[in-house]
Amino acid sequence: MELLWGFMGHSWVYSGFTGLAEVVGAVLLLWRRTTALGALLLVGVLANVALLNFCYDVQVKLYSCHYLALALILAAPAVRPLIDLLLRGRPASLTIPPEPTVTPRGERIWRILRRLVIAEILVVNLANQLGPLIYFKLIQPLRRHPLAGAYEVDRFVRGDREVPATFTESTRWRTFIVRPDGRLAVRLASDHFDDFWTTPIDPETQTVTARRAVDPLQYQAEDVGELRVVDAGGGALTIVGELDGVSVRAQVRPAKRRFELVDHVIQARQGG
C-alpha cells in the first residue's frame, strides 16, 4: 500500500487525471442521456482502482468493488449495442431510460427527497474534505511541536554496530519523523514505516515511550522501548534509547526535500 501511494502521489499530473476521470464519470450519471457514457467511463476507472486495491493490498477492496458493481449495472444496457457496433459491424443505438410514471403528488415528494439526498451528499463530502484541511492548515499549526518535521538519518547505531545505509538493512532508519503533535515515526531503509504509537515528546525530559501496534483495528499496542530526542544544534537532532531490547543511537539532520505522503501513510495506519 505504501508503494502504491508513493508512485501514485509522485506525479500530480497522473493523480489529477485519474481523479478527473472519476469526477467526469460521476457527473455524467446525473442525466439519463449521458448515463451510459458515464457508466462505461466509470467501469474502466473503477476496474483499475479495484485491481490496484487487490494487487497492492489496500484496505478498501470491498468498497471499490461495490462501486464497480454499481457501474456495471448501469452500463449493462449499453453492452449489446456496443457488441453490435464494435464486433459485428451492425448499426446500433442506445435507448434512453424512461422516467418513472408517478402521480403529481409523488412527483413533488420525489423532488423534495432528491434535493435532500443531494444536499446530504454535498454537505457530508464537503465536511469530510474541508474539515481535515481546516484543522491541519489553521488549527494544528498553532499547536505544532517545535521539532516537527522530517529528518534524514546520517548515522545509525544499533547495539554495538553502526548500520550502513543500504536497502538490505531492514532495521536501519532512513528518515526520522516528528509529527506536528510531537509523536514519532521512522521510515526504514527498506522504505517501510515503523510507526510508534507514542505520547508527544515530553517537554521536560525530551523522552517518549515507544509503542508498536499489536492490533491496529482495536488500537492495541505494546511498549517496545524508550527514546530521548536531544537537540544537537543547527536543526540537527540526536536520538538515543532502546528499542526491542537493543540500544539505538541516531544522528539526524533536517531533510531538504518535502515528504507530503508521510502524514497520509501514518494517519491511515492510525485510523486518522
Image (spheres, rainbow, N blue to C red):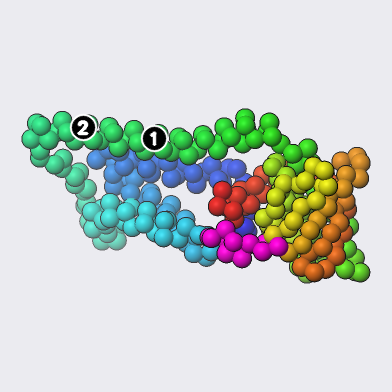
Against 213, is 235 above or below?
Answer: above
Mark 1 or mark 2: name the one nearer the start of the chain.
2
Name the residue tied to disc 2.
Answer: 111
**Dot 1 amino acid type:** Leu
Q: Is residue 271 left or right of residue 85?
A: right
- Which image quadrant for residue 97? top left
The part of the image, by quadrant, that contains residue 158 is bottom right
- Image point (80%, 51%), residue name: 207
Horizontal side, residue 225 vs residue 267: left or right: right
Give coordinates of residue 166: x percent, y percent.
Answer: 81, 65
Secondary element at image label 1: helix
Q: Residue at x 61, y 65 (%)?
A: 214
Query: Horizontal and vertical percent for residue 113?
Result: 23, 35
Q: Nearer the viewer, residue 28 or 187?
A: 187
* Residue extending farthest front: 204
Classified by dominant secondary structure, the portion drawn in magenta counts as: strand
Mark 2, secondary structure of its residue: helix
Magenta stretch containing residue 164, yes or no?
no
Task: Kindly report the distance in space between the C-alpha atoms of the residues bearing marks 1 and 2.
Answer: 17 Å
At label 2, counting other C-alpha atoms closer than 10 Å, the crowd grade (few under 14, some 14-19, many 20 or more) is: few
Which labelled disc corresponds to residue 134?
Answer: none
Left or right of 32? Residue 17 is: right
Residue at point 67% right, 64% down? 222
**Residue beneath disc 1:** 122
What is the magenta range? Answer: 212-223
Identify which residue, 148 or 16, lies in the foreground: 148
Q: How far across and how far down the image is residue 133, in percent?
A: 57, 35
Q: Quadrant of the N terminus?
A: bottom right
Q: Is residue 165 visible?
A: no
Q: Nearer the viewer, residue 145 or 7?
A: 145
Alpha-carbon neighbours of circle 1 within 10 Å: few (<14), some, or many (≥20)? Answer: few
For the residue marked with disc 2, what is the amino acid?
Arg
